[in-house]
Image (spheres, helix red, strand yellow):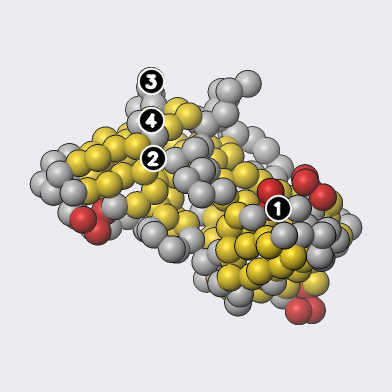
Amino acid sequence: AQSVTQPDIHITVSEGASLELRCNYSYGATPYLFWYVQSPGQGLQLLLKYFSGDTLVQGIKGFEAEFKRSQSSFNLRKPSVHWSDAAEYFCAVHSGGYQKVTFGTGTKLQVIP
Amino acid sequence: NAGVMQNPRHLVRRRGQEARLRCSPMKGHSHVYWYRQLPEEGLKFMVYLQKENIIDESGMPKERFSAEFPKEGPSILRIQQVVRGDSAAYFCASSPPAHSSYEQYFGPGTRLTVT
C-alpha cells in the first residue's frame, strides 16, 4: 500500500528565508506526486505535481520540488518565503489510473516578520 | 470552466440528524472521489464513484455513511444519525474520463459540525 510521511508537523521561518518541507513516500513503482496548500478554512490548491520526466518540478507561487527516487523523497522548496505563504502544506501520492490519492498528515508553516 | 462545487460550505447538525453533502464535478468529469479531513489531520479517502456506480468504498465507515452519483445531478454523501465524531471537513474531487495524468481537482469542502 502506498503511504506518505511528512516528518515535520510545524515549521517556523522568517520572511525572506528559504524553505524546505520534507516528504517521503512509499510505493512500489513510480508514483504520481503532488504538493497541495491549504489556508485555514479553505480547500486545497495544487502547487505542483510530478508524473515523469525532469525530476525538478516548478510550481505556482515560486515553489519547486525535486523527486529523488533513491531517497523516496519529494521535498518542497522555496528560496524566499513571503508572509502569505503561511498555511498548511500536504504532500500526496497517487498510483495512477483512477485510484485514490493518499495524503501526508501535513506541515503547518508559520512565517514570522 | 467552473471548478468542483460543493454545497453547503458549512453544515450544522444535531446528533441523530442526517447530513447530506453535495458535490458537482467539473464539467466533463465523470469520476468523483470523497475525502474526509478530521481536525488536525490530513485528508483520508472515503469513496470513489463513477456515474451510477460505486467503484471503491474501502474508506467508508461500514455504518451510517453512503454515497451516490446518479446519472443526473450531483454526487451525494449521506451521513445518517450523525455523531460528534463525524465533525470534519468533507472534500470532493473529480477527474476527467480520459486523462494521462488522472489528476484530481478538489472542491472547497463542506465543513460539518455536529452539536
Q: Nearer the viewer, mark 2 or mark 3?
A: 2
Q: Which mark is residue B7?
A: 4
Among all residues in the image, which is located at the extreme front?
Answer: A113
Mark 4: give few (<14), some (14-19) or many (20+) Cα within 10 Å.
some
Residue beneath label 3, please?
A: B72
> Do the numbered discs 2 and 4 sit on residues whose CB atoms are within 8 Å?
yes
Q: Are marks 2 and 3 on the same chain?
A: yes
Q: Are marks 2 and 4 on the same chain?
A: yes
Q: Nearer the viewer, mark 4 or mark 3?
A: 4
The chain that hosts pointer 4 is B
Q: CA distance from mark 2 to mark 4?
A: 6 Å
Q: CA distance from mark 4 to mark 3?
A: 17 Å
Q: Residue at x 64, y 35 (%)?
A: B98
Q: Are marks 4 and 3 on the same chain?
A: yes
Among all residues in the image, which is located at the extreme left?
Answer: B16
Residue beneath label 1, please?
A: A83
Q: Are marks 1 and 3 on the same chain?
A: no
Residue beneath label 2, please?
A: B110
